[in-house]
Amino acid sequence: MNRVDRLLALILFLQSRRSATAELMAEHFGLSVRTIYRDMAALAEAGVPVLAEAGAGYRLMKGYLLPPVNFSEQEAMALSTGLLLAQRMTSPGYTQLMQSALDKIKAVLPNDSKDRLQHLVRAMAAPLSTQPPAADLTLLQRAITHQQLLRLQYQDASWQQSEREVEPAGLIYYLGRWHFIGWCRLRQDWRDFRTDRISAIELLSEKVPARPDFSAQEFLQSCVPTPELSALIRFAPVAADRAKREWWQGFGQESHHEQQVQLELKTSDWRSLASWLLSFGTSAEVLQPSALIDEIRQQSQQLLQLYAR
């Protein structure tokens, strides 16, 4: 990104929020804080009414707006790719909104750009999702942004139905599912609601203040176990490729020996890693540690006993 494009992007960034610190803008654009200071000074010299407030950061003078900026062809292509992925990861109502936004962008593109974008759409594909449909994400997002109390009909892991009044906090995607995070008034604690288990959503009129002790990133880290164990596994090349796509707890070193791939796999427990490795059959062999080998032996014996009957 050249400097002119970057300065324009900084104006749009400030225009989209009340204020922003130099540190926040540096992190967003991948720049140093010193570069942000220089760019803010350059905008002020060019006549852009940038104001600086102690403790709050930079903001644009109230009433200052750039005229609408048209999307570039590359930006339209990026959004088209996002729509393709959203169709596999979100609810139908959400993808309809994304399609509507993309159609508006297409409407202002030159004809040759429209043709190229349409060609790209036909040239891309992704496998259809087999996961259960998520609840309406637009309603959940509205509850979060408007700080509205929700009433949910929810089915837990033991198939028990319950009605919950929930103060909305966040939406998190992990382990192939969207999860709605909120303060459950029934349980008087934070709860993680899988959106594919929500059968009904009702937006209530009651407004609830945001809880300052909630952080979506910190909550996500608490949901995903910290992998403190590691194992060395030897894979056939095709199996190694699959392993790197599927194993979600992380990898260490990788090495290649005699048409075999050795991978260091991180895990939080031997049981889950062993059960996953068994799906590879003879295409994966545990080299170490012995605790994982013992776990695979035990699970294999249980399988033999099950099918012997």
Image (cartoon, rainbow, N blue to C red):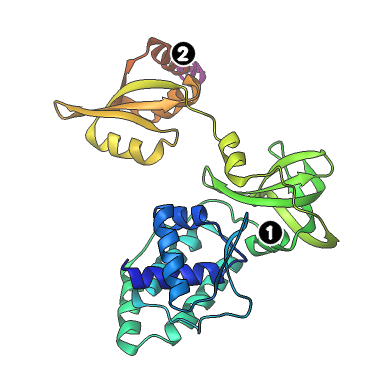
On the rendered structure, is 15 left or right of 278? right
Dot 2: within a 10 Å radius of its alpha carbon, few (fewer than 14), some, or many (20 or more) residues? some
**Residue at horizontal 54%, vertical 44%?**
174
Q: Foreground: 55 or 91?
A: 55
Image coordinates for residue 242, horizontal then vertical, percent:
33, 39
Residue picked out by circle 2: 298
Q: Is residue 52 above or below residue 154?
A: below
Image coordinates for residue 18, horizontal then vertical, percent:
62, 66
> What is the quadrant of the N terminus in the image?
bottom left
Mark nearer the viewer, 1 or 2: 1
- Indicate yes or no whether the magenta region holds residue 77: no
- At label 1, the amino acid type is Leu
Query: Main SS type for the magenta part?
Result: helix
- At label 2, the amino acid type is Gln
On the rendered structure, is 293 left or right of 182? left
Residue 259 occupies quadrant: top left
For mark 2, give the secondary structure.
Answer: helix
Image coordinates for residue 282, horizontal then vertical, percent:
30, 25
For mark 1, give the secondary structure.
Answer: helix
Q: Is residue 168 above or below residue 276?
A: below
Residue picked out by circle 1: 140
**Residue at horizontal 37%, vertical 20%?**
231
Image coordinates for residue 6, horizontal then vertical, percent:
38, 68
Q: Is residue 39 visible?
A: yes
- N-term-proximal mark, 1 vs 2: 1
Q: Foreground: 106 or 146?
A: 146
Residue 294 occupies quadrant: top left
- Mark 1–mark 2 Cα distance, whole angstroms, equals 44 Å
The stretch in magenta equals: 302-309
**Residue at horizontal 40%, vertical 52%?**
32
On the rendered structure, is 196 left or right of 75? right
Picture disc at residue 30: none
